[in-house]
Image (cartoon, grey):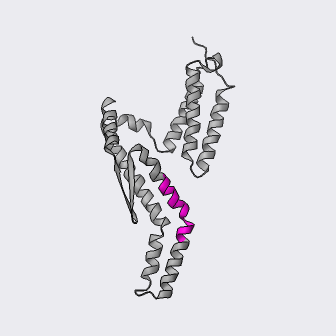
Amino acid sequence: MYVYIICYSLFPPRLATTKVNVQKALANDFDTPRAVDAIMSLIHHSNQQLQGVAKGRSCRSPVVFGAIQSYITTFLDVVGFDLQDRQQAKGGGSTNSLHNVVEQLVKFRSQVRRYALAVDELAALSSESSQPTQEEKAKIKQRKRELIAERECLLIACDVFRQDLAPFGIHIKDRGNSSTWEITEKRLEMLKHDGTSE
């Protein structure tokens, strides 16, 4: 029979702190990088405990690690990673999955940009009269400036999102009111290699 030492002095407070930090990050405009940092810190400290490195104590309670594993799995589900489906879809499906995910992300981003650029509202304003007068044209231009100024933060977020994906080999190109995307060959090769090694 094994006796497990539960380091309640370390893990439940660390898990509780992580939960609070993740909730604050997600409530703060869905600050995913800060939330992931909190999760990674929890994983780091958990790994230290599994290796018996932290302060010379070895805390290997299945209850504590089960709670941590459950929380991390729940967090990944919330942000869109389903580990069980990924394990079932092994074998070449990662490239197709990536394409589907990127397609949906770019489609959503395009809708946000279209809203931020006030495309639909301006089209409705322009179509109200077939031959707008100079005064009406000036009002439409003014309204366009106002709408874009109000929604500038959305355009900035779209640009940041595009820039954040570039290091992963996913390039989004804005073409007027729509966007196109591509995955660089280097990234595709990495995916093919990863898919065959699993």
Relative image position of residue 96 (x, y in whole percent): 32, 44
Looking at the image, the residue that sits furthest to the right is 9
Location of residue 94 by image quarter = top left
Residue under the image location 32 percent in, 34 percent down: 195
The residue sitting at the top extreme is 1
On the image, the x and y values in percent for residue 182 come to 34, 51
Q: Which residue: 44% across, 80% down? A: 126
Which residue is at a point 35% across and 41% down the rendered structure image? Answer: 187
Q: Is residue 154 on the magenta stretch?
A: yes
Residue 29 coordinates in the image, percent (x, y): 58, 52
> Residue 65, located in which quarter of the rendered image?
top right
Q: Is residue 138 above or below residue 166?
A: below
Stretch in magenta: 147-160
| 6 and 195: which is toward the camera | 195
Q: In what quadrant of the picture does the C terminus appear?
A: top left
From this view, report whether residue 66 is shown above or below residue 142: above
